[in-house]
């Protein structure tokens, strides 16, 4: 199956060089999503010597797999945040996010607003089924208490399906084209004197020598920022974070129109819908089907999303389909700042990371410049919150342990190597050794060790993305074993097998 996000499909590819020298700079930023590019730009503008290393292309991972919505609330609900942390923290979270949406607007304007397709719009939170009506009312009360201007209105603008009960409308939220935005910021980074390298995966981050090594070069820096979504290597925060994959599809808007806005249906069939204007006419984007990495049937999730979009917003033609990853912290707040590794990290954004990633860039840039930031304590990477994390941490640890035990004790997906059909993958036993095998459509076989190089869980096949995904902390690998997504840095071990 081939997947391309609507953002990849509607933005020109970037072409920055790969690193092939040894550099000495003030700050090395690893990862060219919204977090890394914004951090690097903010620092380069102050005169810091900055080098950004991106494993693939700028924006190509989760930033380019998002929905491109910018809002002051959070996808898990401000009411849930208030329940866990209290009203004061909920208010600060909303204030930090609203301020960051304004900040993104400023950056988008400087970077040519048209290119980033930034637009202010309303956000509509509504019940997709009767049982979610109460949730909409709780969210209304919580966002008002958190300081946002919001209303309960009788109906949605024409376009989305009818809502059950009242609709929560929050004004002055925003949308943009996330790929075009980070590409525009990347150009500004280079114009401000920063160095930017694509196809330059960090293969080693040495915190004793403060050096990041790539295949053909290295960067030595006073400070290292791991803006790789889940921070590369081993970090305490990974113990409690849950990696999820969520799915997206896009196609021509039915009837050639759809109102601007962020439309979030609450309830058992959660669906996020928005439109995107293109020269060929408006596209409708639908995102949903959130599942734990490596613990679900990916083709089934994509098919369910397509069925829901057909039924609920009459999206009949799918031009783009994709999935992307998010990481949820056990206490529902992101981790931002220096952790015990000595590097700066920014993770645990759930599906709210376009705003949180930009906020992380602001906090980390301020900290590197030796300044206090109003929100650095709220999101501190080294915080310890056993009570607030306990339930999620316990449930998730049990779920992961169950998968690991099953993987090691059962003969999952057992198949004979010789009978593996083109386009298929399986865990096979060969002369007593368990191997992960994939035969491509041309019949070529790739065989690798199924043992994840991060902390040794077993990878699972993802037929939608043609990748081996690790259920423990979300690392993803190509069929040849190379790393597609961290925290793993080392590839899966390749095996020479003929069949
Ligand atoms: C389906 C979906 C929809 C979403 N929609 C929204 C939304 O509407 N609004 C919102 O605010 N948030 C949304 N999110 C969340 C948001 O997309 C992410 O939180 C955000 O993009 C994270 O940005 P990032 O820069 O931290 O990570 P990424 O964009 O993943 O960037 C990390 C980069 O690091 C690179 N990298 C990794 N390892 C290495 C290495 N070893 N060396 C060099 N480079 C490396 C990767 O290639 C990647 O480009 C959504 C998430 C999902 C899954
Ligand atoms: S990602 Fe941690 S063990 Fe695989």
Image (cartoon, helix red, strand yellow):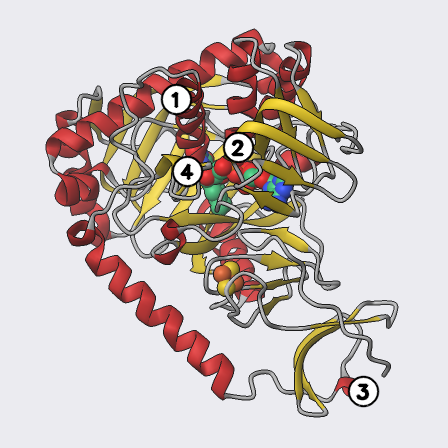
Which part of the image, by quadrant, shows the N terminus?
bottom right
Q: CA distance from mark 1 to mark 3?
A: 56 Å
Mark with earlier residue (3, 4): 4
Instruction: Tell which of 488 and 254 is nearer to you.
Output: 488
Instruction: Tell which of 159 and 307 is nearer to you.
Output: 307
Query: Which residue is the site of mark 2?
Result: 224
Q: Mark 1, mark 4: which one is toward the viewer?
A: 1
**Residue 462 spot, x, y in % from top left:** 61, 65
* Dot label at residue 418: 3
Mark with earlier residue (2, 4): 4
Q: Is residue 112 above or below residue 160?
A: above
Query: Which residue is the site of mark 4?
Result: 160
Q: Secondary structure at mark 1?
A: helix
Q: CA distance from mark 1 to mark 2?
A: 12 Å
Q: Mark 2, mark 4: which one is toward the viewer?
A: 2
> Are dots 1 and 2 in contact, CB under 8 Å?
no
**Residue 415 spot, x, y in % from top left:** 68, 87
> Are dots 1 and 3 in contact, CB under 8 Å?
no
Identify the residue shown where x is 48% and y is 67%. Answer: 296
Q: CA distance from mark 2 to mark 3?
A: 46 Å
């Amino acid at each position: 199956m081939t997947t391309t996000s609507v953002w990849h499909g509607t933005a020109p590819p970037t072409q920055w060089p790969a690193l092939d020298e040894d550099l000495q700079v003030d700050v090395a930023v690893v990862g060219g999503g919204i977090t890394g590019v914004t951090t690097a730009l903010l620092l380069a503008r102050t005169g810091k010597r900055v080098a950004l290393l991106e494993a693939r292309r700028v924006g190509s991972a989760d930033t380019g797999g998002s929905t491109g919505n910018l809002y002051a609330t959070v996808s898990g609900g401000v009411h849930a945040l208030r329940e866990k942390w209290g009203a004061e923290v909920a208010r600060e979270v909303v204030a930090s996010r609203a301020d960051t949406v304004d900040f993104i607007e400023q950056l988008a304007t400087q970077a040519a607003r048209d290119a980033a397709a930034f637009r202010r719009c309303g956000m509509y939170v509504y019940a997709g089924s009767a049982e979610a009506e109460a949730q909409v009312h709780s969210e209304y009360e919580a966002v008002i208490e958190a300081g946002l201007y919001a209303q309960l209105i009788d109906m949605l603008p024409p376009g989305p399906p009818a809502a059950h009960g009242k609709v929560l409308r929050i004004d002055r939220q925003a949308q943009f084209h996330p790929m075009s935005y980070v590409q525009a910021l990347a150009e500004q980074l280079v114009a401000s004197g920063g160095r930017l390298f694509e196809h330059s995966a960090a293969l080693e981050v040495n915190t004793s020598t403060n050096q990041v090594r790539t295949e053909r070069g290295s960067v030595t820096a006073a400070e290292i920022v791991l803006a790789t979504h889940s921070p590369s290597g081993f970090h305490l925060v990974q113990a409690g974070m849950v990696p999820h994959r969520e799915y997206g599809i896009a196609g021509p808007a039915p009837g050639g129109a759809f109102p601007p806005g962020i439309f979030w249906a609450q309830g058992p069939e959660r669906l996020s819908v928005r439109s995107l204007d293109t020269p060929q006419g408006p596209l409708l984007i639908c995102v949903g089907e959130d599942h734990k990495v490596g613990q679900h049937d990916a083709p089934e999730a994509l098919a369910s999303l397509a069925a829901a979009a057909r039924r609920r917003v009459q999206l009949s033609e799918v031009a783009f389909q994709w999935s992307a990853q998010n990481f949820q912290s056990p206490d529902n707040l992101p981790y931002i700042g220096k952790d015990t590794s000595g590097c700066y990290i920014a993770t645990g954004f759930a599906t709210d990371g376009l705003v949180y990633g930009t906020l992380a860039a602001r906090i980390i840039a301020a900290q590197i410049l030796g300044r206090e930031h109003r929100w650095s304590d709220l999101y501190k990477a080294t915080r310890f919150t056993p009570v607030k994390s306990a339930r999620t941490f316990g449930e998730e640890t049990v779920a992961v342990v169950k998968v690991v035990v099953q993987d090691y004790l059962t003969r999952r997906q057992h198949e004979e190597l010789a009978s593996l059909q083109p386009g298929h993958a399986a865990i096979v036993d060969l002369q007593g050794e368990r191997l992960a095998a994939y035969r491509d459509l041309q019949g070529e076989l790739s065989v690798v060790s199924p043992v994840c190089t991060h902390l040794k869980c077993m990878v699972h096949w993802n037929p939608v993305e043609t990748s081996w995904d690790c259920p423990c902390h979300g690392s993803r690998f190509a069929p040849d074993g190379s790393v597609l997504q961290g925290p793993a840095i080392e590839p899966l071990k390749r095996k020479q097998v003929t069949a």
